[in-house]
């Protein structure tokens, strides 16, 4: 192989590698955040905490939406106080004031970031896409607890309140909805 051919080969290989790496970066980062709690990403559990402490913590709720989404989206309650380890239940309300079905998906975050790995969601509307019909109003639950291990973390043990924040984005309607809509 000549010098120009080698250079071209290495250039194409490098560009190809960077393209593949850029597509893999987002899923890898999401996986990393879910596993470690990095960036305020809560952990997930299938059941409640085994241990409940007498210490309490305030949980604040925030809701926002992308400017393109025509829903109204708000937390039903803005703050609750629970014991560390106790299961909490909160609701968010979404309303579709339009004359067409709209699908949405929520992303979430926990602040302060140091509490992210201790904020454990048991069940959440953010795990699934949501479709609201015209004029439909729904209340969507999220159940959670704060892992008692938070009191042993040298940084997170000073956290007195945690904010759970959701942002809804419009997504394409699922195939079933499109099929149903075209059959009407």
Image (cartoon, rainbow, N blue to C red):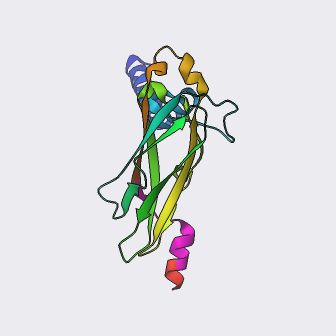
Question: What x and y, as percent, mark residue 11?
Answer: 40, 25
Start-end of magenta stretch: 169-180
User: With 34 as the anchor, is 50 left or right in this view?
Assistant: right
- At 35% from the left and 72% from the top, the residue drawn is 97
- At 54% from the left and 49% from the top, the residue drawn is 142
User: Front-most of 29 and 42?
Assistant: 42
User: With 76 as the anchor, is 128 left or right in this view?
Assistant: right
Question: What x and y, as percent, mark residue 6?
Answer: 43, 20
Q: Is residue 72 above or below residue 60?
A: below
User: Front-most of 11 and 67?
Assistant: 67
- At 65% from the left and 38% from the top, the residue drawn is 45
User: With 118 as the anchor, is 49 left or right in this view?
Assistant: right
User: With 76 as the anchor, is 70 left or right in this view?
Assistant: left
Question: What x and y, as percent, mark residue 105?
Answer: 47, 54
In which quadrant of the rendered view does residue 7 lie? top left
Q: Is residue 178 above or below residue 19?
A: below
- At 57% from the left and 41% from the top, the residue drawn is 144
Confirm whether the magenta stretch covers residue 156: no
Question: What x and y, as percent, mark residue 34?
Answer: 55, 33
Let me know if residue 9 appears in the view.
no
Identity of the residue furthest to the front in this view: 54
């Amino acid at each position: 192989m000549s010098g120009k051919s080698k250079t071209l080969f290495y250039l194409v290989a490098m560009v190809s590698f960077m393209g593949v790496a850029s597509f893999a970066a987002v899923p890898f980062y999401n996986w990393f955040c879910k596993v470690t709690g990095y960036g305020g990403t809560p952990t997930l559990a299938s059941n409640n905490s085994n241990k409940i402490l007498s210490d309490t913590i305030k949980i604040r709720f925030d809701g926002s939406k992308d400017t393109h989404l025509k829903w109204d989206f708000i937390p039903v309650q803005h703050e609750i106080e629970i014991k560390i380890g106790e299961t909490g239940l909160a609701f968010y309300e979404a309303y579709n004031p339009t004359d067409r079905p709209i699908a949405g998906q929520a992303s979430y975050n926990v602040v302060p970031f140091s509490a992210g790995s201790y904020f454990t969601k048991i069940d959440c509307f953010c795990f699934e896409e949501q479709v609201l019909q015209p004029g439909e109003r729904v209340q969507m639950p999220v159940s959670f607890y704060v892992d008692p291990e938070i009191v042993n973390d040298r940084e997170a043990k000073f956290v007195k309140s945690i904010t759970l924040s959701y942002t809804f984005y419009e997504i394409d309607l699922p195939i079933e909805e499109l099929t149903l809509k075209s059959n009407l």
